[in-house]
Amino acid sequence: MKSIIKSLFLALSLPLLLYSCQPETKTENIENKTEITEKTISLNDFAESFGGVWIPKAYLNAITKHKSAYLSHQDIPYISELKIHKNNLNKDTLSVLSGINNHEGYDFKVWKTKQSDKPEYANSLLEWEDDYEFIFSYNTADTSISIIVKNKNDSLVERTDYVRILNQEYAYNSNESAYDYLSRKFVLNGKYQILDATKKDLGIAEFEANTGEISGFKYTYYTLAADFIGGPVYPSDYIILRPALNIYSDQQFLSMIHQNDTIFLYETIDIVTDTSYNVALGKINFYLIDKN
């Protein structure tokens, strides 16, 4: 039964490095009153200067504040992530790897037109949406990217600003979502004393957010759920523990309940009736006491 929920969250992880992770202003749905005029750059220069992994500023603000992927997931927009790398530039077109709601893989293309004198690129964003115009814009002054949505009346519908959090290398080599990395960094990162269900002391383990590696514990890899689309879940963060990165047979999928300096890792129970499907907490498997 649990595989229905678990399959929505599990993702392979490759090592990640932090590029920049400073909170920014929240995504706004109103048009900026002040426009910064600047010259355009070539697509090649854009791929060089803007290469990296980008996520919405609003989400970075949220997870920085809440220290919870679950409490932050409402700030994930439709176009959830941007991966930009010069190796994805083919002549006059750049392929941007992306995601929809941090749930589905997606990519689109951007290109420079001779007619444009603005810092923006023509694009193939959501081509099936005939009622909207999607503008892919950039700002070289502060190295920022925005996706602006307008309706047929040229009125602003939505604006999402993105911030770069990982460098160009991982935009090309990593298959992991940036949200998985951010969840590890802000929710569970560093040294914890581990007790088992009987409160037997299992020693100090260290959780490395960049790589997902654990030292000092029988599980050597972890990540946190960042995709909460597709079914009911207990309203908490979730951790996935594996014996190794690609070993799934003995993995644990546990709900995380925070109380002061301790994280309680619970099993979850599926409660299914003829008319409903819910999730409740089961027994405690581990206690994680913060030693940072």
Image (tube, grey):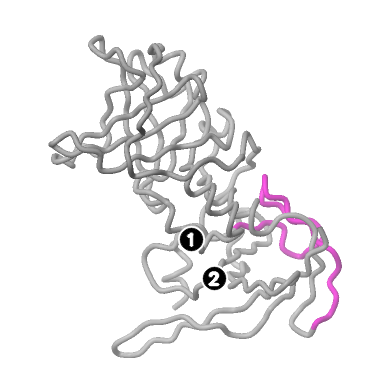
Question: Magenta residues, as a range?
Answer: 199-223
Q: Mark 1 = which residue? A: 9
Q: Quadrant of residue 196?
A: bottom right
Work out whether 42 lies above or below 70: above
Q: Nearer the viewer, residue 228 or 3?
A: 228
Q: Position of residue 179 (x, y in %)?
A: 52, 49
Asked if marks 2 and 1 touch (Cβ < 8 Å), the reply is no
Whether residue 277 sits left or right of residue 19 in the image: it is left
Q: Quadrant of residue 138?
A: top left
Q: Mark 2 = which residue? A: 236
Q: Amino acid at mark 2?
A: Ser
Q: Position of residue 237 (x, y in %)?
A: 56, 66
Q: Please state which of the two labelled residues, at mark 2 or mark 1, is closer to the viewer.
A: 2
Q: Nearer the viewer, residue 272 or 178?
A: 178
Q: Position of residue 219 (x, y in %)?
A: 72, 63
Work out whether 243 lies above or below 3: above
